[in-house]
């Protein structure tokens, strides 16, 4: 059995069975990966607080037959300033959903990693909703450029979210949350 250690940001969590979760991470080393965290839904789990949404974590993973399994998790950064603001959390959900929809699994992308980290750090430094909206739009446009969906310097004519939905062929659900919170 092979083990590896990666640094990643938690994009998504899905309950799996009674006590487990499938965690979607975007890692510097491997790109987007899905791993199983066994027993993490138990009250006594020591890994559960580390594997919360939008945390930057360092995890040790063992390869399994169907899913790789998290054996250790260490919190690197929790971005508490952003998580304490409901408006900013909505934008983080939007960013995580766009990354999850547009990027394939297990394809490393250093430029996207740097873009995600820079965006979250900008949001951490300026917790104003107007800034967060601009930072989020800038992130999505730069992501689209980086992934080659549009030439650099060009902007989607139909709107950023509509363009992402067109590419992913699915709706961006977190957009509704952002719209409701702004009212």
Image: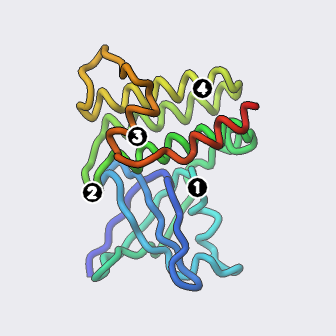
Q: Mark 4 or mark 2, which has the lower sequence index? A: 2
Q: Residues within 10 Å of mark 1 (few under 14, many from 20)?
A: many
Q: Real-space Cα distance between discs 2 and 1?
A: 20 Å
Q: Label 3, secondary structure: give it.
A: helix
Q: Nearer the viewer, mark 3 or mark 4?
A: 3
Q: Nearer the viewer, mark 4 or mark 2?
A: 4
Q: Nearer the viewer, mark 4 or mark 1?
A: 4
Disc 3 to disc 2: CB gap under 8 Å:
no
Residue 125: % across, % down: 64, 27
Q: Real-space Cα distance between discs 4 and 1?
A: 20 Å
Q: Real-space Cα distance between discs 4 and 2?
A: 29 Å
In the picture of the structure, the residue carrying the numbered disc 4 is: 133
Snapshot quadrant of residue 155: top left
Q: Name the residue nearer the viewer: 106 or 162.
A: 162
- Residue under the point 23% across and 31% down: 148
Residue 40: % across, % down: 58, 76
- State the quadrant of the N terminus: bottom left
Q: Is residue 53 left or right of residue 29?
A: right
Snapshot quadrant of residue 47: bottom right
In the picture of the structure, the residue carrying the numbered disc 3 is: 165
- Residue under the point 26% across and 76% down: 2
In the picture of the structure, the residue carrying the numbered disc 2 is: 106
In the picture of the structure, the residue carrying the numbered disc 1 is: 53
- State the quadrant of the C terminus: top right
Q: Which mark is residue 123?
A: none
């Amino acid at each position: 059995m092979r083990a590896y250690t990666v640094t990643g940001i938690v994009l998504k969590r899905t309950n799996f069975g009674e006590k487990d979760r499938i965690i979607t991470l975007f890692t510097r080393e491997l790109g987007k990966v899905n791993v199983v965290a066994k027993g993490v839904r138990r009250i006594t789990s020591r890994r559960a607080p580390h594997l919360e949404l939008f945390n930057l974590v360092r995890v040790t993973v063992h390869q399994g037959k169907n899913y790789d399994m998290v054996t250790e998790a260490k919190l690197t950064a929790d971005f508490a300033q952003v998580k304490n603001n409901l408006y900013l959390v909505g934008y983080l959900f939007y960013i995580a959903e766009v990354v999850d929809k547009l990027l394939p699994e297990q394809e490393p992308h250093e430029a996207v990693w740097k873009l995600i980290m820079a965006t979250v750090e900008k949001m951490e430094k300026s917790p104003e909703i107007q800034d967060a909206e601009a930072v989020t739009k800038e992130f999505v446009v730069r992501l689209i450029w980086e992934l080659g969906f549009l030439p650099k310097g060009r902007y989607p004519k139909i709107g950023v979210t509509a363009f992402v939905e067109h590419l992913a062929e699915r709706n961006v659900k977190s957009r509704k949350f952002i719209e409701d919170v702004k009212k």
